[in-house]
Amino acid sequence: MKVEFYNTKMRKKLIEKLNSQFGITTLPPVLFETGKERIRGFSGDLTIDELYNLADISNVEFIGLYLFKQDMEFMRLGFDGALLLKDQIVKNVVNLKDEQVDKWMNGHNLDIVLEKGMYVVKHGEDVFGCGFSDGKGLINFVPKERRIRRS
């Protein structure tokens, strides 16, 4: 699997985009991109050289946390990335009402009219992932393994 570590210039460009979209200004010290344009963050004790060596012999998707990906023209925060960065997110936030949370966590889209774009979905202080507004409704991006399962 191809792994590309972000240098200072790439990192700065990424933070600028995340800042304009969500208000995010800081990220974990090591950022790298794996398959499907998924960007992961790592803040452990391994050096970049050690991570490169590890990537040669192992699946680095086990290292770090999946933060976000470039999705269409927007950055899409992963479920864990939204949780990790929630205190910095001040733009493009949708606050759900109590009755909308259950519907959202069951994987349903919501009839909320917003400007076209990617949004972080919250209820109070809790973060429930990201959704994309096509201008007609909010499309759910909660991973199936994170949704509420009914027996």
Image (tube, grey):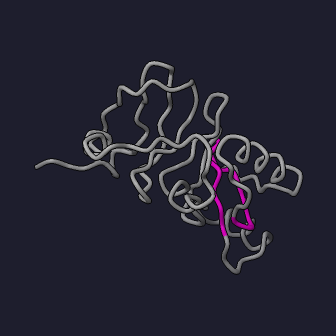
Residue farthest to the top, as pictured:
136
Query: Residue 95: horizontal and vertical position, in percent?
Result: 43, 44
Q: Residue at x 56, y 25 (%)?
A: 115
Q: Judge left or right: residue 106 versus residue 69.
A: left
Q: Which residues are magenta?
A: 28-42
Magenta segment's dominant SS is strand
Locate residue 25: give its quadrant: bottom right
Q: Judge left or right: residue 130 versus residue 92.
A: left
Query: Residue 124: horizontal and vertical position, in percent?
Result: 41, 55
Residue farthest to the right, as pictured:
9
Residue farthest to the left, as pictured:
151
Q: Residue at x 64, y 39 (%)?
A: 75
Query: Residue 82: horizontal and vertical position, in percent?
Result: 53, 54
Q: Residue at x 45, y 24 (%)?
A: 113
Above or below 21: residue 26: below
Q: Nearer the viewer, residue 119 or 75?
A: 119
Q: Residue at x 79, y 46 (%)?
A: 16
Q: How many numbered callouts?
A: 0
Query: Residue 69: horizontal and vertical position, in percent?
Result: 62, 43
Residue farthest to the bottom, as pictured:
45
